[in-house]
Image: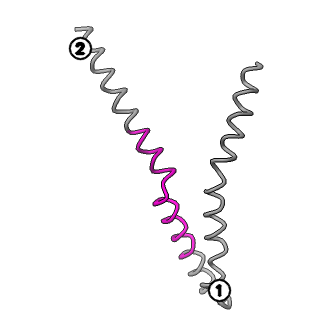
Amino acid sequence: MEMEQLKQEIDSIKARNESVEKDKAWETSWTRRIILAGLTYLAIGLYMQAIEIENAWLNAIVPAVGFMLSTLTLPFFKKIWMRFNLRSKSHN
């Protein structure tokens, strides 16, 4: 019975790992970034149009581009943070 239980636990871990890998792939995908930039543009454009900002749709490009730039630079800063964070933990 123990061997069967171990097999079930291994299968469970493999399924969890596969799910985590898929989530990570989605989080770093261009598809997600483009969808979020598009939704940011749409939401800001609608808001600016509702409050009657001149050239609302043109001005809405700025926050959407800012969002894209922030997602492109995050991996760089994540590496720096991880390097610093792991180093500080190893000194404790």
Quarter of the view holding residue 40: bottom right
Secondary structure at numbered mark 1? loop
86 left or right, relative to 40: right
Is residue 57 positioned above or below 44 on the image? below
23 left or right, relative to 58: left
65 left or right, relative to 35: right
Magenta part, dominant SS: helix
For this rendering, which residue is in front, 7 or 79?
A: 79
Residue 21 forms part of the magenta stretch: yes
Secondary structure at numbered mark 2? helix
Residue density around tag 2, few if under 14, some if 14–19, many if 20 or more, within 10 Å: few
Residue 86 in percent (x, y) is at: 69, 28
Is residue 1 positioned above or below 33 on the image? above
The type of residue carrying mark 2 is Glu
Residue density around tag 1, few if under 14, some if 14–19, many if 20 or more, within 10 Å: few
The type of residue carrying mark 1 is Ile
Magenta region, residue range? 19-42
Residue 51, labelled with which disc?
A: 1
At 72% from the left and 24% from the top, the residue drawn is 89
Residue 4, labelled with which disc?
A: 2
Residue 84 forms part of the magenta stretch: no
Residue 21 in percent (x, y) is at: 43, 39
Quarter of the picture containing the N terminus is: top left
Residue 92 in percent (x, y) is at: 76, 18
Gap between marks 1 and 2, in whole Å?
Answer: 64 Å
Q: How is this picture coloured?
A: one colour
Is residue 51 positioned above or below 34 on the image? below
Q: Earlier in the sequence, mark 1 or mark 2?
A: 2
Quarter of the view holding residue 23: top left
Farthest top residue in view: 2
